[in-house]
Every structure is written in structure tokens, then in C-alpha cells.
């Protein structure tokens, strides 16, 4: 079977799985929507063709994180769409954090301050073969970023356009932050996420437009963190015939093995805590690099290794869980074998989005909207199945946060990525009515 045929076959397998989760569409007139909400539903339906056309246009612009010109071009294409809705649009230059930058759009209003979060970039750089929008059939479109997450941007724009058509957009204060580096965050991270954090501090509610679990029956109330760790071991070197002697000890390789086994035996087990060594290296000489992750080695089998390094990630559901786990890992590292020494360094990346009553309250509102629209119940995703995302930087600063409200599909980060266009109405109508009800309150 040709590669393209295999890709298409995998797409349909993923589609079949997603189709099983799609809620049945009911006639909304049978549901308890007020006349304004019915108008929002109609506006979303009327604008679907234009929205999918815009999605195709921005998918066909390569915006791999390191393709700065492409990321900016997607921002340029979206700018007039936000300006037509009355937003003031600013491009945040990414030079200080070595990325293209971010699009930030703000609009004053009367009601609660809602922050919408998304990203312009994809994992597919210009040298990747997966580049163009392809309509598989009337329901499925393949393309880089179609689901993750240019489709989510389209959902957000369309929902706000429906509110504007109904003359309701002024009922909310709105800020939109679309990052240009979500797939490969710039450094230093505090600069790369500064504008999002500042926007969150001014907001009441944060809504993420990611595709999350790609299941229309779920939304995300909690996400685990994504942080890093590096263990560095030094040991006494000698001829291998002297290993395990009182004067030489076990060497760096065995000490690193003791530490990793200690993590497994003594730290593993708490719910939602995972730690994974992604690189392990030990030899006479080790040249370790963290970005991009790699190591070059040289040594001999008859030398007790004096150097060992392991690099990995650590994921937890809360900040307290993160601190407790780091303390346990430090304790394991400190119990060195004779003639060895070790240290562990931790790096912060994405913080956890802890589950809160506020987040669950927003989910309950979203669930009620979905039921009223005839799309069925929406429950929370198991945090073990929700990776890190930009909403985690905002969640601690708002009263309520919810993610996974964008266009759905499958195959994210692979050449089989697709958007299920049947979820356009589901997700956009849900978001439009949710925003209306938030403004009405």
C-alpha cells in the first residue's frame, strides 16, 4: 500500500472512532433556548461556509513554530477579522524570547472579562511533507493545524461574530491571546508567556480553544504540568578490574541506575504523578546538551565510568504535588553510593491547571448549554489524558477556566491530522451560547 493510502486509511480509522462519540443533532427549536439563543444558532449555521473557507486559507500557510514569517502571516490574515469585530489588535514581537511573537486582541465591554486562548503555530515546519489542506469528503478535512489548533481560532471568531450579528458582543469584555510558539515555547519562558499571564490577571474567565481530547462529550477542567529534570552524577574513575572495591566504588553508571530505580520504587505511585527519563548517558566523557536534547559519548569498556546524566520530564496535577514530588526525588538523589556524588536540577515549563470548583462551575454551565442545544452532556476529561497547554498559565489567575472548546478532529502532531467539520456547528454554537449566558449574568 502506498504511503498516501496508508495515511488515508489511518485517517478513516480515527474518524470512525470519533464518529462514535458525536452527539446526535436535535432540532434546537425543541430545546429550551430563548429567541436570542436561537438567533445565535442561526448566525453560526449561516456563517459556516465562510468560516471553513478561512480555515482552509490559514491552514495552507505554513506556520511551523520556527517559520517566523509564516506565523506572522497567519496573524496578518486574522487581524482584519478581529478588527471587523471591534477589537484592537497588537502584535507582540517575539525577538526577546527568540520566536515570531503573539497576536493579542482586546475589546471593551460591560460584563465579565473573558480571555480566549489559542495559538497560531503548528509542529510542521516548511521542510515537512505535510503542508496543504485536503478535503477528504464533506465532513473531513486534512491539513497541518486543521484541528490543532487553527480550527479552534475559527470557532472562537465565528462565535464572537454570531454575538456581534445579534448586537450582543458589548455584553462582555474580551481579550484574545494567540501565541506563535505554543508547540515550541520561546525562552526565557517568563517573557514568552508574560502577555498571557498579564491578560489573565485582568480577566475573570479563561477559555481555551484547543481540541483537547477530540471528544465532543468532554471538556478540560484540569491539566497536568510539564516540567523537566536533569540528574548529573560524578564518580571515581579507575580500571574496570577495580570496580566495586572499597577504593573505587561502583562508578557513575551504577549510581545513576540506583537513582532511577529509586525514583521507580520510592516516588512512583501517586495519582497523576509521572516522571519519565527521556535521555540516559554514561561514559568516560559525556557532552550533554539540553536544547535540543542530546548527548555525545566516548569511552572504553575497561574504564569505570566517571560521568552519568539522565534528563526527563515530570508531570503533576497541582503545585503542591509538584513540590512534594521534587522533594522526594531530591532525597533519592542525595543517598549516594560510596565515591559518587549526584545533583538534580529542575526546570519549570508549563504549570499545572489544577481542578477547582470554579472550573467545574464553568463546565456545568457549558454542559447545560450543550444539553439545551440538543448535543447531550459534557463531562470533564481525566487529567491523565490532558497534556500541557497555554491555559495552564492563566488558570491560577481567573475565577473559572475551561479548555477543549475548539474544532475537533484527530491525528494531531502527525501527517494524519484531520478536522471533523461536523463538530464546527456543535462547538461554535456551544461557545456562542455560553458567551451569551456569561454576559447575561
Image (cartoon, rainbow, N blue to C red):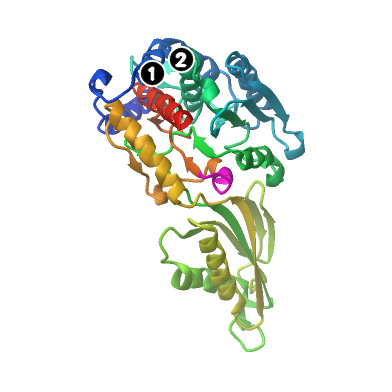
SS at circle 1: helix
From where the camera sits, is residue 219 visible?
no
Q: Is residue 235 above or below residue 132?
A: below
Q: Are marks 2 and 1 in contact (CB under 8 Å)?
A: yes
The image quarter containing residue 15 is: top left
Kindly identify which residue carries mark 1.
36
Depth check: give the residue in front, 233 or 119: 119
Q: Residue furthest bottom?
A: 246
Mark 2 Cα-neighbour bin, 10 Å: few <14, some 14–19, many ≥20 = some
Q: Residue furthest right?
A: 96
The image quarter containing residue 68 is: top right
SS at circle 2: loop
Depth check: give the residue in front, 304 or 409: 409
Q: Residue at x 66, y 70 (%)?
A: 343
Image position, residue 314 (x, y; %): 53, 57
> Which quarter of the rendered picture does the N terminus lie within?
top left
Question: Is 183 situated left or right of 234 in this image?
Answer: left
Image position, residue 434 (x, y; %): 42, 30
Q: Which residues are magenta?
A: 392-399
- State yes or no: residue 393 in magenta: yes
Sequence-first tag of 2 and 1: 1
Q: Which mark is residue 166?
A: 2
Amino acid at each position: 500500500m502506498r504511503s498516501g493510502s496508508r495515511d488515508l486509511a489511518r485517517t478513516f480509522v480515527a474518524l470512525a472512532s470519533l464518529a462514535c462519540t458525536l452527539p446526535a443533532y436535535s432540532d434546537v427549536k425543541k430545546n429550551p433556548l430563548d429567541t436570542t439563543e436561537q438567533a445565535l444558532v442561526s448566525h453560526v449555521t449561516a456563517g459556516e461556509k465562510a468560516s471553513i473557507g478561512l480555515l482552509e486559507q490559514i491552514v495552507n500557510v505554513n506556520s511551523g513554530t520556527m517559520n517566523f514569517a509564516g506565523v506572522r502571516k497567519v496573524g496578518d490574515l486574522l487581524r482584519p477579522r478581529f478588527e471587523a469585530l471591534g477589537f484592537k489588535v497588537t502584535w507582540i514581537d517575539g525577538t526577546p524570547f527568540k520566536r515570531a511573537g503573539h497576536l493579542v486582541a482586546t475589546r471593551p465591554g460591560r460584563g465579565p472579562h473573558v480571555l480566549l486562548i489559542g495559538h497560531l503555530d503548528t509542529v510542521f515546519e516548511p521542510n515537512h511533507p505535510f503542508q496543504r489542506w485536503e478535503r477528504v469528503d464533506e465532513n473531513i478535512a486534512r491539513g497541518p493545524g486543521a484541528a490543532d489548533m487553527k480550527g479552534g481560532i475559527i470557532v472562537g471568531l465565528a462565535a464572537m461574530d454570531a454575538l456581534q450579528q445579534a448586537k450582543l458582543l458589548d455584553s462582555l469584555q474580551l481579550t484574545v491571546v494567540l501565541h506563535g510558539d505554543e508547540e515550541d515555547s520561546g525562552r526565557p519562558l517568563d517573557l514568552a508567556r508574560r502577555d498571557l499571564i498579564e491578560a489573565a490577571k485582568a480577566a475573570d474567565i479563561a477559555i481555551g480553544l484547543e481540541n483537547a481530547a477530540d471528544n465532543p462529550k468532554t471538556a478540560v477542567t484540569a491539566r497536568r504540568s510539564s516540567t523537566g529534570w536533569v540528574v548529573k552524577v560524578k564518580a571515581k574513575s579507575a580500571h574496570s578490574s577495580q570496580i566495586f572495591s572499597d577504593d573505587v566504588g561502583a562508578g557513575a553508571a551504577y549510581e545513576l541506575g540506583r537513582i532511577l530505580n529509586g525514583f521507580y520504587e520510592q516516588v512512583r505511585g501517586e495519582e497523576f504523578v509521572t516522571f519519565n527519563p527521556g535521555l540516559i548517558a554514561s561514559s568516560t566523557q559525556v557532552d550533554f546538551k539540553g536544547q535540543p536534547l542530546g548527548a555525545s559519548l566516548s569511552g572504553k569498556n575497561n574504564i569505570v565510568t566517571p560521568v552519568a546524566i539522565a534528563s526527563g520530564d515530570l508531570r503533576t496535577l497541582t503545585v503542591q504535588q509538584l513540590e512534594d514530588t521534587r522533594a522526594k526525588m531530591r532525597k533519592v538523589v542525595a543517598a549516594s553510593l560510596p565515591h559518587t556524588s549526584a545533583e538534580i536540577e529542575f526546570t519549570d515549563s508549563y504549570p499545572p491547571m489544577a481542578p477547582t470548583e470554579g472550573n467545574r462551575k464553568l463546565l456545568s454551565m457549558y454542559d447545560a448549554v450543550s444539553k439545551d442545544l440538543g448535543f447531550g452532556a459534557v463531562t470533564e476529561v481525566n487529567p491523565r489524558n490532558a497534556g500541557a497547554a497555554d491555559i495552564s498559565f492563566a488558570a491560577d489567575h481567573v475565577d473559572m477556566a475551561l479548555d477543549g472548546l475548539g474544532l475537533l478532529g484527530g491525528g494531531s502532531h502527525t501527517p494524519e491530522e484531520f478536522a471533523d467539520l461536523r463538530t464546527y456547528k456543535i462547538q461554535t454554537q456551544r461557545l456562542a451560547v455560553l458567551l451569551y449566558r456569561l454576559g447575561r449574568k
